[in-house]
Image (spheres, grey):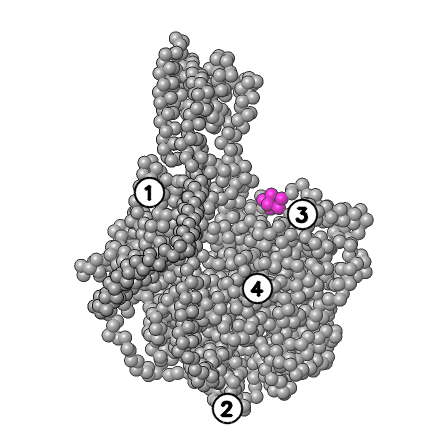
């Protein structure tokens, strides 16, 4: 549901944007060309500014609409440092408001360019204002398609079940009462007789079957085999959680990040190539992008909340910060020592080999069984990645194996001995 | 040829008492009542079939239900903003300082978990004492003060500051005295803070005292040479070392430093160069240093000074008035021979004495001056700052306070209510003082008498610096945010004195910037950062001057004689109060690692005791551990169990200080008895010897002694030789000479089999018995590295200590003929002389046998051999049959009788949630019912290999260091790859001295020992 509404929202936005652009093309005034301005805006300004919200710099829409002195604005954009040096009161005010972080100097922009940018920003802001006025209607539809909550559904099912039970009980009562009435009238005996006959017939089939010893044996055998294999499988898979896919506190999609966006695994899981722990990224890694990307998403706001970050003021309030409790998907028991870097760096094994095609998983699940059998199987089948690694140069066992034409697998070097993983 | 010398661990083993023989028949101290079950009602009782089935059904059902537990959901909580230097799973090391020694602190995910020596450290050269190893545990001590306190009630810092400042201002206005009482402070910045405080409060003064005082030496140097300093000694430059009761390898001034120096002239390298120092020890109680001496002469405490006078006479050829013979004729003989040795080694000899008496130390100065030791083995110009306490100032302070002359006192790292010799005096004195503040981070004995407790940080939470030796400066940096609401004492002093600098870090930086960085040719921010990384700076040492001794010794001799008369005449026994290497002065009594570390000599844990000579015990008709009441001249008396200590001088009793704390914390409270009140003040210094009476009581107080726990049944496992023999034949004593017994090998055929060959690494160890001093630092280091639980006194008494490495201490006899001879069975009854025993320490740990007897008996293959020569232990496979322990000839396997990490009975030790933070995350904790033993720090081997693999280079020799090896100041343990012929361990094992313990069993142990060599005085017996 949520996905659909998100897609809808995105779709409607883009439609509106196209419409807006068309509109802006119509209303373009002669002196400044907002289309040209847009190109410049996107190339030079978007690193620090947005039109509607404050980023590193102020939200330009309201700012430039309120400020009508274009000469001043041109001067500011072309060389804000000069204005500050000249102690222009307006310039100083905004300079101090933004923690005395000076804006980049754009002396390469001609007056006309600046005018185009200003025109674009003003136009765009106007359109956005207009859109907002229309927005409430869209909002209502969005709320409507959010659908009934699961609680409501459960309540409904509960009511239906209870009603059904009540009907059953009432029927039963009615039947009993009727029978009572009938027995009073002396009509019941007949009915019972007919019933008994039917039962007798049925039982005869069962009795006959019970006398067939082969059948009994067959059934018992089947039962034993079924029960046995079931318990075998159950016990064998006790504590094996292949396919475990817990619900995470933030709906983070690996498919989007690792698949669509093609982010490297270790951009976030920094430890995977250095340490035994791959490590879940700390939130400052998320903020590298999400300070600016998808700032309106409720999932991203969970990150902001956890950090105590206010996207409006862009300030962190550490007193409000609280950690995010992710649910661990891959749980090795404490008695097994596993080191990521040994496998990723030394063994040059792809993450996907053990974790599956994470880049296609909307939500991550445990791909491998993570049993000792699984570990050992791989250690018996995988060759040591010895090429170009000086560590293996003088390791005789490895070379013996290669000389003898055997596969130089991990277990040749003792890779399946107890104390390689258990200490 | 095998040596025919007999070694024994304890008198019960030597005597083969029936209890001992009986006990040693069994692997475990307590019999498992199988026979009872079988012979009693167990088998004859009839269980009806139906009852049996019911029980079975219920049992299966109950177990199934109990197992139907939801799989726990594990949460992963990342940092909100991860500090750049932290990678979860990778340890960070920070340089810091412990007690003047530069150290490295290993932290994981922000918590310090292990202390390691800084290889560049001037003092211990990368080794560390047991105390330093254990110090990390104190950070997580649950008995630490959590908040500042006013009149015993927790309060906040602002309230405390207001109270203290108001009081101080009022006292200053009244012109009354303010005293800062501390144990020796050798941090230059702390001293500067105290100086600033004194400037702000002109009536303030700084009184320094040490619980175990060295005033005698300092005062004697002042008298002799005009320099009131504790000299810096060089044992490595001395060929002949004579010690009169100074435990210089253990507790005397700077044990770790002296150990590393001392061993330089006795280790493999030195022996191969045919060079070995000679060490002669005269002492009353058997000290750790005494156990390492080549010749050890027991003398009474009262004869300490007399023996020195005799030595002086022999050296100078004069006779001091009042000189007399010693009661031990052998010792007299030895002194003459020692004098000859010393004179032959002029400028390469050193005489030290443990006494705190000014006269005795003056005489020692005279002797060292005669021998030309000053400028050679003793340095007065770059002195030690480790102890600077002044007994006179200290007792004067107490007297003044008692007289009401002091209005405020601040205790910094001082606990006089426990360690002052006269408890009543200190209590009376403190009652008269208006403002009493202690910076103690524990609610100790003194804190109970104070108005305010301003808890100090643990050193791992602090900024600071240190200077143990003149010219050597180290830095202390925090490795964790403060665990409790504590504040650094220096910062408190800065705040209370309204210093312009409010934070100690700023103060420290400024002090280093202006005064200290330049000494290490550093400057500015870059210099400071370089210092933090390196941990220390070493200024060029001052040139040594020449010192000549010119005092009149007649008066000195008179004092010595009168004092010795007092000790000898007072009562029947002479008491010597000493420190144990684990507990020292008792400040760390709340540390369970130290309490459970067996004393190097007595092997007693969790207690102190009255050590007496076995002959005296026999004369008194005492049983082992029978309680005696010792009463001092000042009326103080304690009741302590008696311990028969071979080597103890007859007519003497030794009692350790550091015990008997009443307010140390959960662990240390009421462990043993306090011996400080036996101190007495004589000629301005505290004397550790006095006359006492010994009264026998009928009580028995069993001590938990580990010495005879894991008996070898008198097998020939210690090998030793004299230096003379060694020079003739380097293989002397190793058992290699003569005919070798034919060995048979069950596995011979399978040597080619890959499963029994070790193609890449063969991890082995070499232990030099000549270097090992028996201090036990390795035991604590191993505990910290491998998450070894502390089990407590009761469990140790049941032989259930869990240490993976133990130091076995063996006694043997000198029959007085110069040959340490066989002591045959029953011969013990004829032996009269329990005093002349020699001692060998042998670290014993899993030998990682190639033909390990434990492996063949395990029914579940929980212990198997690796292709790297390691005897592996898979805990989760172990079902606890304990067959392996039974079959281990070295007795190094340990069984988890309890779930020590999650059992409320062991809360006081390590298994509370706070102290569990010290656990090494790379090593699993073991569950109840599982065997464990030394793994040769396999986690370190694996980490080392991985590092080499990632860096794409072969693993270098010495790169992987096991925990016991790393902490050993004596470098007695070498670990490495036997397959590499150039590795240190291969070289060590190729030495002629190498032998393998119980080699004849052909279990092919992976640990080689090197014969103990003793540089005996061969003329002594002539």
Tell me if residue B195 comes above or below residue B683 in the rendering: above
Q: Quadrant of the C terminus of chain A?
A: bottom left
The chain holding disc 2 is B
Report how far apart the C-alphas of labels 1 and 4 lie in the structure: 48 Å
Q: CA distance from mark 3 to mark 4?
A: 29 Å
**Residue plotted at (64% across, 83% down):** B327
- Closer to the camera in the image, B241 or A123: A123
Residue labelled with disc 4 = B908
> x, y percentage for residue B742?
30, 82
Camera-near label (1 vs 2) is: 1
Nearest to the eye among marks 3 and 2: give it: 3
Image coordinates of residue B516 in percent, x first then y, are: 58, 47
Query: Which circle's residue, 3 or 2, is located before the other in the chain?
Result: 3
Left or right side of B506 for B939 = left
Output the chain of dot 4.
B
Instruction: State the residue in front, A96 or B376.
Output: A96
* Magenta region: B503-510
Callout 3: chain:
B
Q: Earlier in the sequence, mark 4 or mark 2?
A: 2
Please determine if labels 1 and 2 lie on a single subunit. no
* Residue that badge 2 annotates: B826
């Amino acid at each position: 549901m949520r996905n659909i509404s998100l897609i809808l929202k995105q779709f409607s936005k883009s439609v509106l944007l196209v419409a807006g652009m068309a509109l802006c093309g119509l209303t373009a005034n002669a002196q400044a060309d907002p289309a040209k301005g847009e190109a410049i805006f996107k190339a030079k300004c978007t690193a620090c500014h947005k039109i509607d919200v404050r980023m590193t710099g102020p939200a330009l829409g309201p700012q430039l609409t309120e400020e009508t002195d274009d000469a001043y604005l041109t001067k500011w954009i072309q060389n804000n440092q000069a204005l500050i040096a000249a102690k222009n009161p307006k310039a100083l005010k905004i300079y101090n408001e933004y923690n005395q972080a000076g804006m980049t100097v754009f002396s390469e922009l001609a007056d006309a360019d600046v005018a185009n940018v200003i025109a674009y920003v003003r136009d765009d802001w106007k359109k956005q204002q207009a859109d907002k006025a229309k927005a409430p209607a869209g909002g209502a539809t969005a709320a409507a398609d959010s659908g009934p909550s699961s609680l409501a559904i459960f309540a409904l099912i509960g009511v239906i079940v209870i009603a059904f039970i009540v009907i059953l009980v009432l029927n039963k009562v009615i039947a009993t009462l009727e029978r009572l009435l009938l027995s009073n009238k002396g009509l019941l005996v007949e009915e019972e007789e007919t019933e008994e006959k039917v039962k007798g017939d049925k039982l005869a089939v069962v009795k006959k079957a019970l006398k067939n010893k082969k059948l009994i044996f067959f059934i018992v055998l089947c039962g034993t085999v079924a029960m046995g294999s079931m318990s075998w499988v159950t016990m064998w898979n006790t504590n094996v959680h292949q396919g475990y896919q817990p619900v995470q506190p933030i709906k983070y999609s690996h498919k989007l990040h690792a698949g669509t966006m093609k982010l490297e695994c270790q951009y976030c899981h920094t430890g995977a190539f250095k340490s035994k722990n791959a490590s879940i990224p700390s939130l400052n890694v998320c903020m590298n992008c999400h300070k600016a990307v998808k700032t309106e998403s409720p999932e991203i706001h969970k990150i902001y909340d956890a950090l105590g970050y206010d996207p409006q003021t862009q300030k962190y309030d550490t007193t409000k910060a609280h950690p995010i409790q992710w649910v661990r998907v891959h749980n090795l028991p404490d008695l097994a020592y596993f080191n990521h870097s040994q496998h990723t760096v030394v063994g040059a094994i792809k993450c996907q080999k053990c974790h599956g095609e994470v880049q296609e998983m909307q939500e991550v699940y445990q791909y491998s069984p993570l049993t000792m059998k699984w570990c050992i199987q791989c250690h018996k089948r995988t060759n040591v990645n010895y090429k170009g690694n000086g560590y293996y140069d003088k390791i005789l066992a490895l070379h013996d194996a290669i000389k003898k034409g055997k596969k130089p697998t991990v277990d040749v070097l003792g890779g399946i001995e107890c104390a390689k993983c258990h200490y | 040829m095998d040596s025919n010398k007999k070694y024994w661990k304890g008198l019960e083993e030597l005597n083969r008492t029936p209890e001992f023989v009986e006990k040693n028949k069994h692997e475990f101290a307590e019999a498992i009542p199988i026979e009872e079950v079988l012979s009693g009602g167990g088998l004859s009782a009839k269980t009806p079939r139906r009852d049996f089935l019911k029980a079975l059904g219920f049992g299966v059902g109950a177990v199934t239900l109990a197992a139907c537990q939801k799989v726990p959901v594990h949460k992963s909580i990342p940092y909100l903003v991860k500090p750049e230097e932290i990678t979860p799973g990778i340890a960070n090391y920070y340089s810091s300082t412990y007690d003047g020694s530069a150290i490295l602190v290993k932290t994981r995910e922000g918590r310090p978990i292990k202390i390691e020596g800084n290889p560049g450290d001037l003092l211990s050269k990368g080794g560390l004492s047991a105390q330093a190893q254990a110090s990390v545990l104190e950070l997580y001590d649950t008995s630490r003060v959590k908040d500042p306190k006013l009149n015993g009630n927790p309060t906040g810092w602002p309230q405390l500051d207001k109270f203290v400042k108001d009081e101080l201002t009022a006292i200053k206005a009244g012109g009354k005295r303010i005293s800062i009482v501390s144990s020796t402070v050798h941090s230059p910045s702390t001293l500067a803070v105290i100086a600033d405080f004194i400037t702000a409060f002109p009536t303030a003064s700084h009184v320094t005292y040490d619980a175990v005082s060295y005033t005698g030496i300092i005062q004697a140097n002042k008298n002799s040479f005009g320099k009131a300093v504790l000299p810096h000694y060089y044992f490595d430059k001395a060929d002949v070392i004579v010690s009169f009761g100074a435990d210089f390898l253990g507790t005397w001034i700077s044990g770790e430093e002296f150990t590393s120096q001392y061993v330089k002239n006795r280790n493999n390298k030195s022996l191969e160069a045919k060079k070995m120092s000679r060490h002669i020890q005269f002492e009353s109680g058997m000290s750790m240093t005494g156990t390492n001496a080549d010749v050890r002469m027991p003398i009474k405490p009262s004869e300490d000074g007399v023996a020195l006078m005799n030595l002086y006479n022999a050296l100078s050829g004069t006779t001091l008035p009042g000189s007399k013979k010693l009661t031990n004729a052998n010792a007299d003989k030895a002194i003459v021979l020692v004098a000859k040795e010393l004179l032959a080694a002029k400028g390469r000899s050193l005489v030290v004495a443990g006494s705190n008496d000014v006269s005795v130390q003056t005489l020692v100065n005279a002797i060292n001056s005669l021998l030309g030791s000053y400028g050679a083995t003793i340095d007065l110009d770059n002195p030690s700052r480790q102890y600077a306490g002044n007994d006179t100032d200290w007792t004067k302070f107490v007297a003044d306070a008692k007289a009401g002359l002091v209005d405020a006192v601040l205790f910094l790292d001082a606990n006089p209510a426990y360690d002052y010799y006269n408890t009543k005096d200190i209590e009376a004195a403190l009652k008269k003082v208006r403002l009493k503040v202690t910076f103690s981070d524990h609610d100790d004995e003194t804190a109970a008498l104070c108005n305010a407790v301003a808890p100090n940080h643990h050193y791992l939470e602090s900024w600071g610096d240190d200077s143990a030796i003149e010219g050597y400066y180290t830095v202390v940096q925090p490795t964790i945010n403060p665990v409790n609401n504590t504040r650094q004492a220096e910062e408190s002093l800065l705040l209370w004195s309204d210093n312009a600098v409010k934070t100690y870090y700023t103060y420290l930086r400024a002090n280093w910037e202006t005064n200290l960085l330049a000494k290490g040719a550093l400057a500015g921010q870059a210099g400071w950062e370089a210092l933090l990384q390196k941990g220390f700076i070493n200024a060029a040492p001052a040139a040594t001057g020449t010192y000549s001794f010119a005092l009149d010794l007649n008066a000195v001799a008179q004092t010595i004689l009168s004092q010795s008369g007092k000790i000898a005449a007072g009562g029947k026994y002479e008491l010597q109060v000493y420190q144990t290497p684990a507990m020292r002065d008792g400040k760390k009594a709340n540390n369970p690692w130290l309490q459970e570390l067996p004393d190097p000599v007595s092997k007693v844990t969790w207690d102190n005791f009255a050590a007496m000579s076995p002959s005296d015990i026999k004369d008194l008709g005492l049983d082992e551990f029978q309680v005696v009441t010792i009463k001092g001249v000042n009326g103080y008396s304690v009741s302590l169990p008696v311990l028969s200590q071979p080597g103890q001088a007859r007519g003497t009793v030794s009692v350790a200080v550091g015990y008997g704390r009443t307010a140390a914390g959960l662990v240390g409270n009421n462990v043993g008895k306090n011996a400080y009140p036996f101190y007495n003040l004589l000629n301005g210094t505290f004397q550790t010897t006095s006359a006492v009476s010994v009264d026998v009581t009928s009580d028995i107080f069993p001590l938990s002694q580990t010495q005879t726990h894991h008996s070898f049944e008198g097998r020939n496992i210690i090998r030793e030789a004299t230096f003379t023999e060694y020079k003739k034949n380097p293989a002397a004593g190793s058992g290699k000479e003569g005919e070798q017994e034919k060995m048979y090998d069950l596995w011979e055929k399978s040597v080619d089999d890959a499963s029994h060959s070790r193609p890449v690494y063969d991890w082995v160890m070499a232990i030099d018995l000549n270097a090992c001093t028996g201090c036990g630092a390795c035991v604590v280091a191993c505990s910290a590295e491998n998450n070894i639980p502390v089990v407590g006194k009761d469990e140790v008494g049941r032989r259930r200590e869990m240490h993976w490495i133990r130091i076995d201490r063996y006694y043997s006899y000198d029959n007085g003929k110069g040959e340490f001879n066989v002591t045959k069975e029953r011969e013990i009854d004829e032996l009269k002389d329990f005093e002349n025993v020699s001692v060998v320490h042998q670290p014993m740990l899993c030998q990682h046998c190639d033909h390990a007897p434990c492996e063949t008996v395990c029914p579940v293959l929980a212990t198997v051999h690796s292709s790297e020569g390691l005897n592996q232990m898979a805990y989760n496979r172990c079902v606890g049959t304990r067959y392996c322990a039974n079959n281990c000839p070295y007795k190094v396997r340990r069984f988890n009788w309890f779930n020590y990490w999650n059992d409320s009975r062991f809360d006081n030790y390590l298994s509370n949630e706070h102290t569990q933070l010290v656990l090494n995350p790379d090593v699993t904790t073991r569950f109840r019912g599982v065997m464990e033993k030394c793994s040769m720090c396999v986690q370190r081997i694996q980490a080392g290999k991985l590092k080499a693999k990632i860096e794409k280079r072969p693993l270098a020799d010495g790169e992987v260091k096991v925990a016991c090896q790393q902490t050993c100041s004596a470098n007695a343990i070498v670990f490495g790859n036997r397959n590499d012929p150039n590795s240190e361990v291969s070289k060590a094992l190729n030495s002629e001295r190498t032998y393998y313990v119980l080699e004849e069993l052909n279990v092919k142990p992976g640990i080689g020992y090197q014969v103990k060599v003793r540089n005996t005085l061969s003329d002594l017996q002539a």
